[in-house]
Image (tube, rainbow, N blue to C red):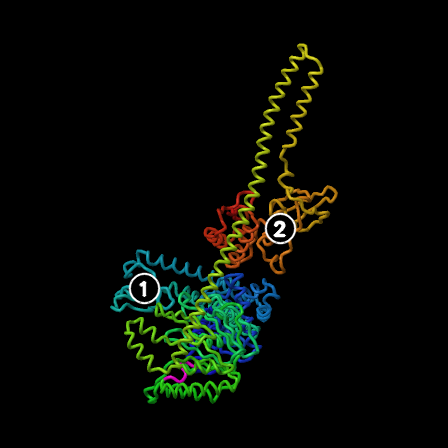
Amino acid sequence: MNSKALSVLEYNKIVGMLVDKTTSSLGARHAREITPSSEMEEVQHMQKETSEAQSMILKSGNIPLGGIHDIEHLAKRAQLGSSLEPGQLLMVCDCLRAARRIKGFIGKNSPEAYPLMHVLSQELSVFRDIEDDIENSIIGENEIADTASHELKSIRRRLVQKNEDIRAKLHSIITSTSYQKYLQDAIITIRGDRFVVPVKQEYKSSVQGIVHDQSSSGATLFIEPISIVNMNNDLRELRLKEKEEIERILQLLSQRVGEFADEIAANSHTLGRIDFIFAKGKLSTQMRGIEPEITSEKYIRIKNGRHPLIPGNAVVPINIWLGREFDTLVITGPNTGGKTVTLKTVGLFCLMSQSGLHLPADFGTTMGVFEQVFADIGDEQSIEQSLSTFSSHMKNIVQILENVTADSLVLFDELGAGTDPVEGAALAMAILDLLHGLHVRAIATTHYSELKHYALTKAGVENASVEFDVATLSPTYRLLIGVPGKSNAFEISKRLGLEDYVIQKAKELIDTENIEFEDLLQEIEQKRQQAEADRLRTLSEKQEAERLKEDYRQKWDSVNRQKDKIISEAKREAQKILKSAKEDSDELVKKLRDIEKAGYTKEMNRKIEQVRGDIKKSMGKLQTGVDDIIIPKIAKKELKTLKPGDEVRVITLGQKGNVLSCDNKKKEALVQIGIMKMALPYASLEMAEQEAAGKGSTGAGRIMKRKAESIKAEIDLRGMNLEEAMYEVDKYLDDAYISGLEKVTIIHGVGTGVLKSGIKQMLKRHSHVKSSRDGEYGEGGMGVTVVHLK
């Protein structure tokens, strides 16, 4: 790709943004080496990689990319028999752990959804035994664990014991009354790995031993008493044995790494590649990018493209196309109107898409693959070479014309500027004619009116302009294709206060045809703006009509619901009244029977019972039951049969559920709605509408159903390290919360307490956690934590 174009289009800044998204030196190296490709299959492959990484980031959030190092040289050294340092072995261990975690992370996702990432993950080799051996043997950069070997543990235990014996012996010497007068201080110190005591110079001959050092003044000698010489020798011997054992352990671990040096080196390379791909995904997420459609045509269609180096609150999206109806686009308009930004956006989008990077644009953006992108943008006047602005531009244009092909994209900023306007315009048209004849895709910005005429009359060449608001004397930065730009010099001058007679004189000095052409452009622009305003007003009115229609529908539904509610409440109130009336009538009947006993006839009693029956019958007509609530008022086609597993909708409740069991004779079904089960008549149900393919599997209701059916009320973390456990707990709490569980149990065991402490800290700040406590007797005690969810 043309290096000058990469520079003027600021491709290096995009590369810098990509490098910042990597997490390792290997990933950063891949990012720095990224270049646009002219092979369509390669470009499509790189774009798919970025899309899979972006999707995985949006789906899963944090990616376990920590611990990636460049260890290829260490693996080769180990293969040749060299012994690696503890810090180097820890780097190898980190890389092995990173490979295992990333392989597991990618493996949890569907191979059909992420085929390219799964292919990369299959290239990673897992060596858990080597990883564990290094982790258990090496504590830090220069520290080997006691448990690295039984021999090392034994040596260090004897070292501790020998140290204690020497100190005890020396302590008895410095506290002895016979020695105290010889000592400068009653302390034990070390010189050259030997325990010594400070003796006054004048008593040198009184203390038998070996002199190892003396103070700067010479008044104190540091003597190793003869009684501990052998003990110090034993201590030194143990230290040499410790050193030899450590070297043996490091050599053994290095040999194990060397056995699989090729696979471990390949891991390192693959991890760097994965880090680089996820960096592309992170950059796409930050820019709100999309994967453009890559076409074999030399065609560009950018929908609402935003220059990635302009802040999001300042950038104005552009819509531009080139390569089908026309091959050459001539953009006119005032200075600072956005012409150069448009050129840079198109050129940079080509370089980014051919590098496998997503574009900050809308879906529907299509990019062709070009062999070369050439750009002549900016003022490159050279004092050293005595070149004017025009000469500098022409030198660049000559180089472009010498190397351009039909598979190239050429961008010219202010083509023909810097010289006589008539000659410059003629030269610009000749250059565009040459490129057009070669079927080269070209975009040029200009101020020359002649180029507007040229674009209007030349087949395959189109005008475009950047919009300018004369009322505010400011550009809108919108690109209008098919509309030639107007200079607006007279309008701007008038708005700034230039006298009318001066402007009129200027108009008289311009060719009449030019004035008429400019006036025509102004009339076209005014009509376009009016049409756009009418379109927006019509769209607004349509949206308002839709809103009013929706409001009316909601109010109509609300009225119907209120009507049913009022009727139901009225029936309940009538029931209360009739119940009271029945109680009164029963009391009356009782009194009448008392009267009957006093002399009334059986005929009177029959009439009284008839009145009671009539009252009870009238109450029955007003009785409100479950059927009145569940069975819809408006009759629908009743279901004839159902089977377990059918998805149905409760008509009056508006809720979907799944049939657990059914009785086709009684016309009743047991339906699960969320976590609730209800026995419902067929008349209250209808078959749920099947959602479009792809939607049902990701809807919130279906997710909740799956989670509710499969989620357990506990999670076992035993055997995991803290990082793995925190990842699993976070995902489990999300599932439990979605499933509607109120209480769950986290089993972490007692152990060293690190796992429990880390999980406790995580729960304190987790958004789904209401409270947590240690397990009680019968729940698991200190080995579990009971969590109450919000």
Please state the horizontal and vertical placement of residue 398, each as a whole percent of the image: 43, 89
Q: Nearer the viewer, residue 83 or 690?
A: 690
Task: Check disc 2: other Cα within 10 Å, few if <14, some if 14-19, many if 20+.
Answer: few
Q: Main secondary structure of the magenta part?
A: loop
Which mark, residue 400?
none
Which of the 4 quarters of the picture holds residue 663? top right
Query: Is 413 covered by the magenta stretch?
Result: yes
Q: Mark 1 falls on what kind of element?
A: loop
Among the two numbered marks 1 and 2 on one chain, the one whose residue lies closer to the N terminus: 1
Q: CA distance from mark 1 to mark 2?
A: 85 Å
Task: Check disc 1: other Cα within 10 Å, few if <14, some if 14-19, many if 20+.
Answer: some
Q: Mark 1 — residue?
A: 207
Q: Mark 2 — residue?
A: 709
Please state the horizontal and vertical placement of residue 765, each as a whole percent of the image: 45, 52
Q: Where are the magenta residues, as a range? A: 412-417
Please state the horizontal and vertical placement of residue 670, each as a whole percent of the image: 67, 44
One can see residue 246 in this view: no
Q: Nearer the viewer, residue 221 or 546?
A: 546
